[in-house]
Image (spheres, coloured by chain):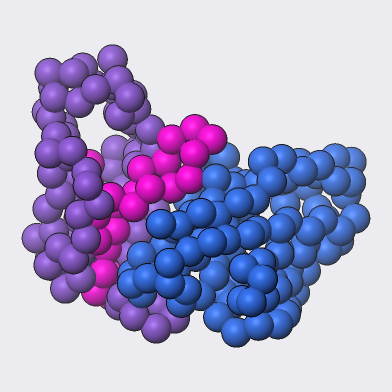
Chain colours: A blue, B purple
Amino acid sequence: GQNIDQPTEMTATEGAIVQINCTYQTSGFNGLFWYQQHAGEAPTFLSYNVLDGLEEKGRFSSFLSRSKGYSYLLLKELQMKDSASYLCAVRGPNDYKLSFGAGTTVTVRA
Amino acid sequence: ETGVTQTPRHLVMGMTNKKSLKCEQHLGHNAMYWYKQSAKKPLELMFVYSLEERVENNSVPSRFSPECPNSSHLFLHLHTLQPEDSALYLCASSRGTSGTDTQYFGPGTRLTVL
């Protein structure tokens, strides 16, 4: 089975940095995704990691360590619009199968 | 806008009703998915279609019946639902079902079963 853990809630100040951790124990691993979901809206794709290391995309970066079953999403220079739920998802054992964590709700305060 | 649309956006139905959810993708993708998102719970994969053939049926009760008439459209037919089926139902599509294909989601249908 798939077990994916991430914190339920995080709060940070505008302009600060927040790191959202995700740990996983899965039967088969073909990559890890991060999605952002604003309340009442569709999850939108943020990043994909399949090899170990850091992927940087503007203010957002994602890190993966396959040996540790661990990933994080780093949000820099936080803006109010970054207040949302962030979903960690692991692909596997089949390529079409995504297993999601319950999501981390990030609240950005002025 | 992700290129995936869903109708209706909100639906309230009684346990004896029959209704259908519709999903349409404008991305030229070949795979489509139904997910269920309940409050404070992870997204649950329900069904996967690839090239209009069902490749995954994730132990979903028979009161949910999917239909994929072509690669752009996906339906979820609902009948004799239970109150615990109230949730956000999300549709997604991807170019294929292999490699690095990313799933793109629609905005969802918020379903309430009375």
Q: What percent of the width, then of the height, locates residue B56? A: 21, 60
Magenta region includes residue A5? no
Question: Does A65 sit left or right of A76 as displayed?
Answer: left
Task: Report the number of discs.
Answer: 0
Q: Is residue A66 left or right of residue A12?
A: left
> Position of A70 compared to A13: left or right?
left
> x%, y% of residue A18?
82, 56
Query: Where in the figure is residue B28, as x and y percent of width and height?
Result: 28, 75
> Which is more toward the observer, B6 or B14?
B14
- Vertical placement of residue B63 versus B1, above or below: above
Q: Would residue B109 be seen by someone viewing this image from the given angle? A: yes
Q: Where does the magenta region start and end?
A: B20-48
Residue drawn 28% across the image and 43% down it = B7
* Residue A9 quadrant: top right
Q: Main secondary structure of the magenta part?
A: strand
Q: Position of residue A63 (x, y in %)?
A: 70, 73
With respect to residue A25, does B50 lie above or below? below
Residue that appears at 43% across and 72% down:
A28
Identify the image quadrant of the N terminus of chain A. bottom left
Q: Residue at x 63, y 59 (%)?
A: A23
Quarter occupied by residue B70: bottom left
Say if the magenta span includes residue B25. yes
Task: Judge by depth and name the residue closer to the eye, B15 or A90.
Answer: A90
Q: Quick one: quadrant of the C terminus of chain A?
A: top right
